Amino acid sequence: MTKKTLQLEPLSCPSCMAKIEGMLKKTKGVSHAEVLFNSSRLKVEFDEAVTDVATLTNNIGNLGYEVLGER
């Protein structure tokens, strides 16, 4: 399992956080996803044999949010 922390664009409300977490938790290969609302950071743990950061970033983008980079 790979653990990454990604910086998201500033989130405007807790429902944004829940939307991103919910989508990631349903993503194949993701075993843990936690969005920290105050810092707009995403802590994610995933199996690199199944998914990767680029795919996760793209999926978050499809929800209308931007990943600014890794932390």
Image (tube, grey):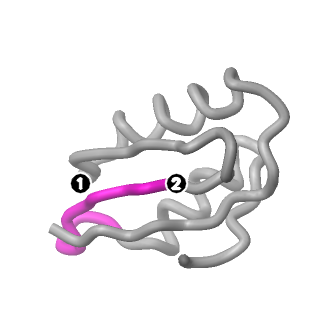
Q: Please provide the residue range marked out in magenta.
A: 42-51
Q: Secondary structure at mark 1?
A: loop
- Residue 29 is situated, as x and y percent measured from the top left of the image, at 23, 54
Query: Residue 60's x, y, as percent?
Result: 62, 51
Q: Is residue 63 above or below residue 61?
A: above
Q: Looking at the image, is 2 positioned above or below residue 28?
A: below
Image point (27%, 48%), residue name = 28
The one nearer the camera, 58 or 69, is 69
**Residue under circle 2?**
42
Q: Which mark is residue 50?
A: none
User: In the picture provided, is 4 more to the left or to the right than 59?
Assistant: left
Residue where numbered disc 1 is placed: 29
Quarter of the image with the N terminus in it:
bottom left
Q: CA distance from mark 1 to mark 2?
A: 16 Å
Q: Quadrant of the C terminus?
A: bottom right
Residue 55, magenta (yes or no): no
User: Looking at the image, which is closer to me, 37 or 63?
Assistant: 37
Residue type pointed to by label 1: Gly
Placement of 12 over or under 64, stated as above or below: above
Left or right, 21 with reference to 19? left
